[in-house]
Amino acid sequence: MSARPRTIVGLSGGVDSAVAALRLLEDGHDVQGLFMSNWEDDDGYCTAARDFQDAKVVAEVLGVALHRVDFRREYRDRVFAHFLAEFEAGRTPNPDVACNREIKFGICLEHARRLGAERFATGHYARLRDGPDGVELHKGVDPARDQSYFLHSIEPGVLGSIDFPVGGLYKDDVRERARRAGLPVYDKPDSTGICFIGERPFREFLSQHVVSRPGPIETQQGDRIGQHRGLAFYTLGQRGGLEIGGQAGHDGGAWYVAHKDVARNSLIVVQGHDHPLLQATALSTEPMHWLTQMPAAGFRAMAKVRYRQADQAVEVTPLESGGVRLAFDLEQRAVTPGQYAVLYQGTRCLGGGVIESTEPAAARAAICSGRMQGQQGL
């Protein structure tokens, strides 16, 4: 074994992972890079080929070896298949969470160990701290970049063997360190879009993989005012892309998606950004993934139900199913089944779970009448 700890860094070709490798070298680690290919790069949108060239240049500047591994099959089987299944079921998934669990801190970590790594590092904006019960996951110091939300479902047992070297930095500091070190990616734009798939026209992309099942667009009173392309192509709270415009007898402003009635293949829309049908006072999750000991009783915490959302105060009640019920202090807009509810105490991430259903605000419940009453998740 090397006198210096061997750490393999997931080099993505971006500035964050480049500076992660730089900092580890400065701290005396024996650093090697690992580039993952997780998607086909011949469709005009995936940037894998260009990113690999950037990762090669970074490795050359830093003087470290660079390995390349192909996880395209694993990504399709473990992440993308679930992604599509959730859309087919009328929900809105978050593939970045599954990708971190299954790929980056799953099979990629295992591959790094086969390469002789004692530790595995990435450019995520998060921090790790030693706590009384083991290593804890905490938010990154840059509130605009914190990625702990996407990391909440990795196995707690791996936290002791991974590093997030840029988690204590702000993005501007990361870019400046890269510039001073002569790393050519110092001003490379941040990656966007679906994890590893890239930024592309989403509806067009999804239509290549999900069967379109058109159906009615209806008001909460049951008036049909248009036709949707398929429930998979819409998400709660969505305003654009409904193609209904002004409707006779409905001049109350913009329309928003309020509910997907999967049983009837109907899309329910309302007018007004803050319409009561878009509000919820509580939610329930599927079985939780805990990064701490599973609580036996209720407790207070902060929660996010989407990335970049400000923390929301909640009362947490464990459920027999293994999930939790989160009762919000303040009503929440467009809480979306299929997304993740992630819990925090201070900066520490406690874990999270997939949102299964929501509970309506009182005003919302009063609006639901006739056949609309009792529809789960409405």
Image (spheres, grey):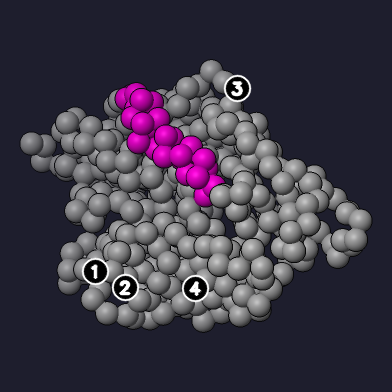
Quote the CA–CA distance across marks 4 and 2: 13 Å
In this figure, which residue is indicated by the disc labeled 4?
Answer: 282
Name the secondary structure under disc 4.
Answer: strand
| Drawn side of residue 364 relative to residue 181, left or right | right
In this figure, which residue is indicated by the disc labeled 2?
Answer: 318
Dot 3 or dot 1, earlier in sequence: 3
Residue 367 in percent (x, y) is at: 69, 73
Residue that appears at 54% across and 47% down: 90
Amino acid at dot 3: Gly
Dot 4 or dot 3, earlier in sequence: 3
Amino acid at dot 2: Pro
Dot 2 or dot 3, earlier in sequence: 3
In this figure, which residue is indicated by the disc labeled 3?
Answer: 44
Q: Residues within 10 Å of mark 4 (few under 14, many from 20)?
A: many
Magenta span: 68-92
In this figure, which residue is indicated by the disc labeled 1?
Answer: 294
Q: Can residue 43 be spotted in the picture?
A: yes
Quote the CA–CA distance across marks 4 and 3: 42 Å
45 is within the stretch colored magenta: no
Verify CB contact (< 8 Å) between mark 2 and mark 1: yes
Q: Residues within 10 Å of mark 2 (few under 14, many from 20)?
A: many
- Compared to residue 110, the image places residue 320 above or below, namely below
Q: Quadrant of the C terminus?
A: bottom right
